[in-house]
Image (cartoon, rainbow, N blue to C red):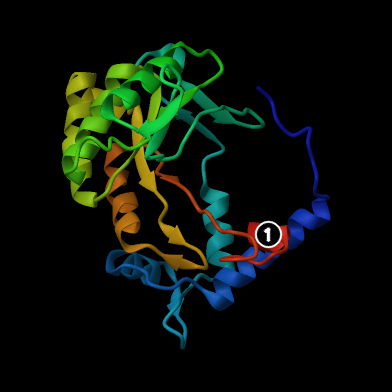
Amino acid sequence: MRSGRFKPLSDRDVERIHDTALALLAEVGMANPIPLLLEKALQAGCRMNDHERLCFPRALVEDTIARVPREIVFCGREPRHDLEYQGSRVHYGGCGEAVRILDVENDCYRPSTLLDIYDCGRLVDALEHIHDHSHWMIATDIGDPRQADINAAYACFAGTSKNISLSFASAANVEPVLQMAQLIAGGEQAFSERPFCSGGGCCVVSPLAYGEENSEVCIASTAFGSPVWIVVAPQAGATAPAALAGTLA
């Protein structure tokens, strides 16, 4: 599917929002960077300001954006599910971590379970216009966070052969899931050639601060060898400016 036809903002508006974002990163900066992130950022040319916030020089951000690949393939376990991100191509998928689900058979909401994660994976696998998968809910029937992460990943792998975005309660939970994915792929080399899943999280807490645990998860998720997915969820008028342009910046 092609995008680019809906343009609520003029080119000048987009430039102003982009310029504001660069100014915020350079002058206001980000609070609470974890040690590894701080170390790498300072080595790259960032600085800590007088308020102990990590600031990103405008030139560094622009150079980084310029180096980002313009074409990326997100692999499925089967090549027919490969997603080619380039130009104006658009792909659809779900996300979120709900703790309740609508039980259509009993006409009520109930706590979501591991079986629901598996069933949603099967649904995604069968729907032509849902192109990738992430578990949309929490397995509330598993109390241990480590076991919940591992089993949720397994339920996703069992449910669909499309590309999967995974989330983790702790960075320590990434490695066992990576090992599972490598086994499914047929070995470490086979997975590295066609990584069919990725990890990530909400590493930024609005307004303009890093979340420690999710930052660690995002860094650990680079081990999958695929792009790390990131969610930023500012609330206009609460943790972000009331004006939507300010929230977007």
Q: Which of 132 and 95 is in front in this view?
A: 95
Q: Measuring from the top left, give residue 96's x and y in whole percent.
A: 44, 39
Q: Which of 67 and 215 is in front in this view?
A: 215
* Residue that appears at 33% across and 38% down: 138
Please identify the quarter of the rendering in which residue 147 is found.
Answer: top left
Q: Quadrant of residue 228?
A: top left
Q: How many numbered marks appear?
A: 1
Q: Tell me where residue 125 appears, x and y as whole percent.
A: 42, 15
Q: Residue at x 38, y 35 (%)?
A: 137
Please identify the quadrant where the C terminus is shown: bottom right
Residue 3: horizontal and vertical position, in percent?
Answer: 70, 30
Image quadrant containing the N terminus: top right
- Residue 249 visible from this viewpoint: no
Q: x, y (%) of residue 120? A: 39, 22
Q: Mark 1 points at which residue?
A: 18
Q: Element under label 1?
A: helix
Q: Determine whether, in the image, residue 228 is placed left or right of residue 22.
A: left
Mark 1 is on which residue type?
A: His
Tell whether 224 sits left or right of 76.
Answer: left
Residue at image point 44% right, 71% down: 45
Q: Residues within 10 Å of mark 1 (few under 14, many from 20)?
A: some
Residue 77 relative to residue 129: left or right: left
> For the point 35% across and 36% down, which residue is it?
198
Where, by quadrant of the figure, is residue 178 drawn?
top left
**Whether residue 111 can be seen here:** yes
